[in-house]
Image: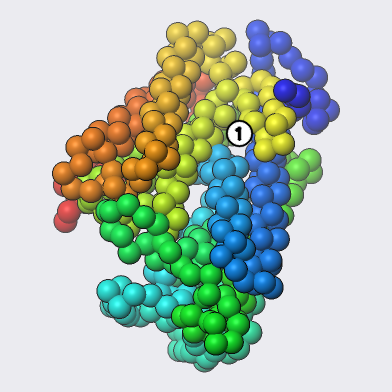
Amino acid sequence: MKTTLAMSALALATASPALAGKPEVVANYIAIAHAGYEDSLIAARDLQAAVDALIQSPSAEALQDARAAWLAARVPYQQTEALRFGNAIVDDWEGKVNAWPLDEGLIDYVDPSYGGASDANEYAALNVVAAPTFTLSGEDIDATEITPDLLSGQLHEADAIEANVATGYHAIEFLLWGQDLNGTDHGAGDRPWTDYAAGDDCTGGNCDRRGDYLKAATDLLVSDLEWMTAQWAEGGEAATGLTADPDAAISAMLTGMGSLSYGELAGERMKLGVMLNDPEEEHDCFSDNTHNSHYYDGLGIRNVYLGEYARIDGTVVSGESLSSLVAEADASVDRSLRAGLDDSVAKLGRIKTVAEGGTSYDQMLARGNDAGEGLIMAAVDALVAQTQDIERAVTLLGAQDVAIEGSDSLDSPDAVFQ
């Protein structure tokens, strides 16, 4: 397997592990980030090609190809989520590409059981695909052409309501799979390919506009990933800012690891769903791909600590790492954190294996499924345990301004039901 040395790519000398320094660790982190976003962009362009093929020549095979491309696109992107929380440039942007959960009735038709507008969101059943004109925040909107600008500039998070997700992976996911109406039984969404067919073969109505929405959302995803990839390239805003302040960069790395591990993944994405026994709390709820999203989130956390990322082309970006720094200061803390990361990835991998074997993540969330709850909570416990070691590493390295995000599901369980 070919290895790409991150520091040589950034014109920095490679240091031995015993002489690891913060600038070298930060340079490798930047190289991993750039590679992760570049892989996400490559995979999104493959998705774009599959979506274009589906729209141009709708068929069951073309829909399946687009779904497969979407699933493949999630693999590199989820590994970049460990860059969140500590990097403002990522946090300010990521809601456009990976916001969830969403009120899917905003976008397209839904089952009558979904309901309609509510006090919380009057646009929950707007159905833009079926509405060439509508009123939004008191303004008459001309949506006769569904464009990226319409989705990102007017529709996404309309009225500052987070559930009005009009762009990103999950909007595309809904348009490819449709609603998952199986509850905690097995099965994903089952949108027919004829939802993109022409003429009398069209199901669901407005097939041409549905295709326009899918294309606009996919094109927008590609352009958003192009922008973020450039920020982590040499001379980009993210790369330049972190290189200029290695201490702040180390804090950003630890914040991202800890917050994704604890509050976001263990708490909001996993334990909350178990507490509520609610498949709507799945991250990839339309496609039943949540087991993979969780697994690659866990892998991304480990990537940051070990300073190593396996690219989709089989090459590896590697170099100096947080592990190098922690090991120099206290080898026992490094060993414990490495072991904890391996344990969480293994337990997330067990969920992935069971799901791929036929027991989907939403089934694991069902009330009374002790085995499913046990699988999920074993991974939650491992993520919580590794976060404690991340906090030890924070103290050991003297990192400043590291605030690891929490979750009511972990910190105040009673508040979840209030």
Q: Quadrant of the C terminus?
A: bottom left
Quadrant position of residue 15: top right
Q: Position of residue 165 (x, y in %)?
A: 47, 67
Say which of 6 and 377 sits in front.
377
Are there few (<14), some (14-19), or many (20+) residues within 10 Å of tag 1? many
Say which of 47 and 143 sits in front.
47
Regarding residue 244, the answer to whether it shows in the image is: no
Quadrant position of residue 87: top right
Q: Image check: 8 left or right of 199?
A: right
Say which of 329 and 278 sits in front.
278
Q: Residue at left 46%, top 68%?
A: 191
Say above or below: 71 vs 155: above
Say above or below: 353 vs 157: above
Q: Residue at left 69%, top 22%?
A: 319
- In this view, which residue lies farthest toward the right? 11
Per the image, label 1 sits on a secondary structure element best described as helix
Quadrant position of residue 187: bottom left
Q: Position of residue 162 (x, y in %)?
A: 42, 65
Q: Residue at left 47%, top 42%?
A: 292
* Type of amino acid under label 1: Ala
Say which of 389 and 308 sits in front.
308
Q: What residue sits right under mark 1 in the picture?
A: 249
Colouring scheme, one of rainbow, by chain, secondary structure, one colour: rainbow
Regarding residue 287, the answer to whether it shows in the image is: yes
Say above or below: 14 vs 116: above
Q: Position of residue 30 (x, y in %)?
A: 68, 35
Q: Quadrant of the N terminus?
A: top right
Say above or below: 235 vs 139: above
